[in-house]
Each structure stands twice: as structure tokens, then as C-alpha cells.
Amino acid sequence: MTADVAESVRGRDLLAYRDEFPLLSNATYLNTCSLGALPRRGRAKLHEFLDQWERLGASAWYGHWMAELGALREDFGWVIGRPGSEIALAPNVSVALASFASALDPLHRGDEATTRALGEALDWRPSRGAPSRTRVVTTALDFPTLGHQWLARSPLGVELVVIPSPDGLTVPLDSFASAIDERTALVATGHVYFTTGAVQDLPGLARLCHERGALLLADAYQATGLIPTNAAALGVDAYVSGSLKWLFGGPGTAFLWLRPAVRQALVPTTTGWFSGSRQFEFDVASLEFADDGRKFEMGTPAVPSAFLARGGMSLVREIGVEAMHARTVELGASAIRLADAAGLEVRAVRDDAQRAGMLGIRSATPRAVVAELAAQGIIVDARPDIVRLSPAFYNTESEVADAVEAIARVARAGP
Ligand SMILES: Cc1ncc(COP(=O)(O)O)c(C=O)c1O
């Protein structure tokens, strides 16, 4: 933690925000990496949507909702250090990925114009007679939907390469280095891995990809709202994330950001009428893409979810990502210390600078442990072989201690 951030965490009472989250008075909630708790202002925003719909019907689109969608693009742009005009909204990360993946299909086929345009965007000169870029590289620690986009394209000749994690926690750059070659179109991996909390070195990985003419996409679902980010400075070409977890905005809203040169070089082959530059001319016979982030949008957005997401974003903007991150990492470190002391087997990155919002405690029966804790009002999560804990800025040291103690009690009692 830097001195400035430490000061900002101490200097402000983050726990005063607990009252924003009614869930926290009913349960010990340590599962933000699955679903952030609902803030009161999210509920208020949803009511605002309902009131507008009830009062105005379709006029709400022009009077309010299009502006709200624009404001949400600005919010998402702000949280990744980019202008809102570079953001494409999507209902979930899978749709955002599908739209991006569709634009790579011509590259996989060896289409010359796409290969040339991307080469220029990456400052890369393809050698004569180079093979088509049919491969996408991901890792064994990544969220399934990331690999699934390209597994679903295997009938088109796309091959998914899955790199193992040598320690079950991280995937070092060396492992990527041996997997990326002139057949690689894309490396798609997490900014933060969803079971281990390990932070990936994206600038280093971007250099590695670009030296070999491959694109880099980061799935930032477990990073956005937690890791202070400037997507362009990370060097990534594509960045996807959403409101569900560390943005406290509930399901139904996600986004895609593309580096502007890459966005210009790519043309989606899966689309919808919100991506057009002349959307309200209703011309079925022509398609001109918007020249900003909306190029990768699809159809009618989930407006109630956009309102909810704006409620969460107002909180994130007010508190600031640095303060949330510092407190989250501090609570994670406490959980690791307590679990070590209780003799539990911790599966987490030890270095605070390399760990984000979650840690695992090894268990042979994680689902049973999660159910036992839920019966005691402690909400944690199960993933294969681990009980996953994710303290957030709104949790207390004693909540973390209670959860670790409850896990230790269940472990002592045995199966
Ligand atoms: C790293 C990561 N990516 C993606 C998702 C979800 O993807 P989608 O929005 O398509 O459901 C999650 C969690 O739900 C996640 O943890």
C-alpha cells in the first residue's frame, strides 16, 4: 500500500458505508467476487427507471434512457481510465466476447485485408507465407466463458490452446512465451484470476504478444473497481468487464473496450442495430458501423440493469478505486494470516501487491463447508477444491475472523 493510499484509507471511515448495504446487517457477506452486495442507491436508481417507464412509456427512451446509457458508458470509461465514447455496452461478458470474437473470424481464415489492418494497428509486419492465425491462447485459471468463445469456433478451424498453471495460482510470462507463435491470433486471459486472486502482469504480456504479432484481450471482471486501471497504459488491445462484482451494480451490464486503432481495424460479424451510425434511419438494407465504441454493441440494452449499475458506479466514484483496493487487500492479508494460524491450507498469492480480491482455503468438501457456514449466516463460496473468501471494503476484521474460525471448526469436526 502506498503512503497516500494508506492515509486515504485511515482518513476516511469506509465502514460508514456499511449502512448503504442492508445485506451486511443480515449476514456476514464475504462473497463479493461472486456478486457485490446491493447498495441502497442501486435500489433507488431501479425505482427511478420504473417511475419513468410508468409515467412516460416509450418517451422515457428519448427523455431519459439514452442519456442514462451514455452516462453508464462514461462511468465504465472512467473506471478504466478511458473516455466513455470508447466503451461498448453488453448484457454480460460472454456477449461482449462474442462480438469481439466475431471480428477475429476473418483473421483466423487468413483474410488479407484484416491481417494487414491488424498488422498496422499492432505495428507488426507479417512475413511472406506466414500461416493463418488460427490459434487462441488462454490458461487453465481463466473463467470458462473466455475459452468457450473460441472452442465454439472449432468448426471454423479455430484452435484453443490452454496453458497450465505451474503452481495452481499464477501463470508466469514464461509459460505464455512458449505458447505464442506466428499462428497465434490472440491471447485471452484474466487481469485477476477468479479463483486465486492473482494479478497478471498485463504490460509484460502485451509486449510478448505484440512482439509476435498477436492481440491481447484481458478479462477484467475480478479487477475492475479493485485495481486502479488505465486500460491503454496496460498495453492490452481488448478489455472486458462488468458490473456484477466489484462495481456493486448487479447482473445485466458489462462492457468491452478496444484500443482505438484495433477497434478501427476490426469489423464485427455478429452485430445489432445499436452498433449502427444511422440507427434511427431504420434502413434494413445498409449497415454503417458507429465510429466509436458502440461499433461492438448489439440490440436493445437491459435498461433496468443500466440504472442499477449506475447506482453502484456512483458509490465507486465517491469512494475511489484506490481506497477500495487498499482495504480489500488488507482484509485479504488478515484472512491469510488467520487461516495460517488455524492450520488451514491457504491457496492464495502471498504478496499483497500481486493479489486482488479473493483467496482460497483448501477443502475436500467445499460445498458442504459453504452450506455449513451459510447455516451460521456466513456467506462464502465453493470452487473446485477450495472455499473461496472475498472480503470487500465494507467488511470488518471481525467478520473475516469469524469466517476463518468457522471454516477451521468445520475442518476440525471432519467430514
Ligand atoms: C473472471 C470472470 N469472467 C467472467 C465472468 C462472468 O461472465 P458473464 O458476464 O458472461 O456471465 C465471471 C463471473 O461471473 C468472472 O469471474
Image (cartoon, rainbow, N blue to C red):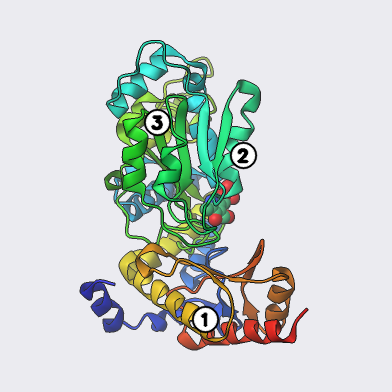
The N terminus sits in image quarter: bottom left
Residue 114, image x, y percentages: 41, 18
Which quarter of the figure has residue 370?
Answer: bottom right
Q: Is residue 305 above or below residue 235?
A: below
Q: Is residue 210 visible?
A: yes
Residue at (57, 86) in percent of width and height: 342
Q: State the residue in front, 272 or 322.
A: 322
* Towards the viewer: 183 or 325: 183
Q: Secondary structure at mark 1?
A: helix
Q: Earlier in the sequence, mark 2 or mark 3?
A: 2
Callout 1 touching callout 3 (CB < 8 Å): no
Position of 9 with respect to 56 (left or right) is: left
Instruction: Return the residue at label 2.
Output: 148
The span from disc 2 to disc 3 (Cα, nearest Å) is: 19 Å
Q: Residue at x 29, y 22 (%)?
A: 120
Q: Mark 3: few, some, or many residues within 10 Å (few <14, many ≥20)?
A: many
Residue to which mark 3 is pinned: 214
* In the image, residue 339 above or below residue 155: below
Kind of residue sitting beneath label 3: Ala
